[in-house]
Amino acid sequence: MARPKASSAADSRQRVFDAAAVEFAARGYAGASVDRIARAARLNKAMIYYHFRSKAELYREILRDMFSAVRAGVTAVAASDASPDDKIRGYVDAIAAAAEARPHFPAIWFREIAEHGAHVDAATLGYLRDVMSTLGAILDEGRHAGRFHPVTPILLQGAIIAPLMFFFATAPLRRKIERAGVAGISAVTRDMVVAHIQQLTLAQLEGKIV
Amino acid sequence: MARPKASSAADSRQRVFDAAAVEFAARGYAGASVDRIARAARLNKAMIYYHFRSKAELYREILRDMFSAVRAGVTAVAASDASPDDKIRGYVDAIAAAAEARPHFPAIWFREIAEHGAHVDAATLGYLRDVMSTLGAILDEGRHAGRFHPVTPILLQGAIIAPLMFFFATAPLRRKIERAGVAGISAVTRDMVVAHIQQLTLAQLEGKIV
DNA sequence: GTCTATAAATAGATAGAC
DNA sequence: GTCTATCTATTTATAGAC
């Protein structure tokens, strides 16, 4: 199972991609340096322009990768034969899984929101649309099955995605705040947050609130 | 009530502050340009270094302003003689009010989270600590009054702050996604979101969930 | 595919005149 | 308080050798 020589090019491209994700997450699009990305990828700057057209295109590819992964996760959940309740649980879990598989995800997403989606191209926009309409489809299915009460989808979506991304993105800052004297703020686990969001979401859909 | 001449200096300092908030929100700390801030403030670059020690100190002052405002809002609510329920409602509303008074707030906050609070100094850290311990105090008061069930404070805090900041920060991106075919995503109002978060929070504290 | 060298613009910060 | 001019480092991107 010797690795073929041809994979070395693919490896260098992947090294650029990975190093760029770290750099964009840490410094933002405008603050990221192509020089630093090259150094981290153990390559020279010219190789970045060989593999990608520009800094912007490299960044857009990272965005597409992030949201195509989320889309793939949630559409798989929606297409399964699980109950509407379990699809809601799976929807939350799939978003968490996509974020966890990419440590740069929450930071880049937060920054991209801050600049109004300036680098969100048509493909990424399509993934975002699909993620949201997938939740809508699950809600419709649950309603028609007589299990879900009517809700405002966008409020529900916000109550899922926001605390989830917030949890992952704030992990380093929470450690800093904890050292400043707020006890227990870092003790929250991924499973606690996911379970909490799942319960809150289902409680709304079961009409336990309002 | 003629304005004294001395206020012109204060004005130029404020112009720098305001222009910097816009620039940092739009491009992030590393991406922000002192040149552009000066141009937007209708001043030259040297004036920025006259009023502030450095780009970093200018940025840190903006962070302090943001979180001292949040701290002031929530401590006023906690110190009032309202019921625990109303203090929870007021806590949510105070955070929303501080964010609304500063259009740059959500974007800068999201970016600062993304870089792990690298520019959060001791003063800002103190404000953050106070905001969180204020929620803890309201929860304690409600429990001792026999009105609130025990909850995990940090999960509750996340379920308040995250959707709130997310709502404000994503407004421009949501308009972009709406144009891509997701209807109604921009129709959500500030009052709907605040009311929703207030209800969700109180439902948890009243033990309606879990 | 990978490199060095370099172009052309812009960065943060300061000196010194007024 | 406000300005122009400038220093030094760094920026994105490309040309061209191998």
Image (cartoon, coloured by chain):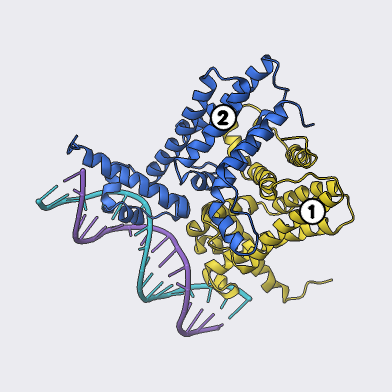
Chain colours: A blue, B yellow, C purple, D cyan
Of badges 1 and 2, nearer the viewer stands: 1
Q: Are marks 1 and 2 in contact (CB under 8 Å)?
A: no
| A204 or B28, nearer to the observer | A204
User: Horizontal and vertical percent for residue D14?
Assistant: 27, 49
User: Horizontal and vertical percent for residue B49?
Assistant: 55, 73
**Residue at mark 2:** A91
Does residue C13 appear left or right of residue C4 in this picture?
right
Label 1 SS:
helix
Question: Badge 1 sits on which subunit?
Answer: B
Residue B77 in sight here: yes
Q: Amino acid at mark 2?
A: Tyr
Up the image or down, A186 lies above or below B188; here it is below
Question: Where on the picture, by quarter, is residue A192?
Answer: top right
| B9 or B108, nearer to the observer | B108
Does residue A117 appear left or right of residue B124 in this picture?
left
Q: Which mark is residue B140?
A: 1
Question: Could you tell me which quadrant the N terminus of chain A lies in?
Answer: top left
Label 2 SS:
helix
User: Horizontal and vertical percent for residue B122?
Assistant: 62, 68
Up the image or down, A73 lies above or below A163; here it is above
How far apart, in angstroms, are the residues tagged by discs 1 and 2? 34 Å
Question: Could you tell me which quadrant the C terminus of chain A lies in?
Answer: top right
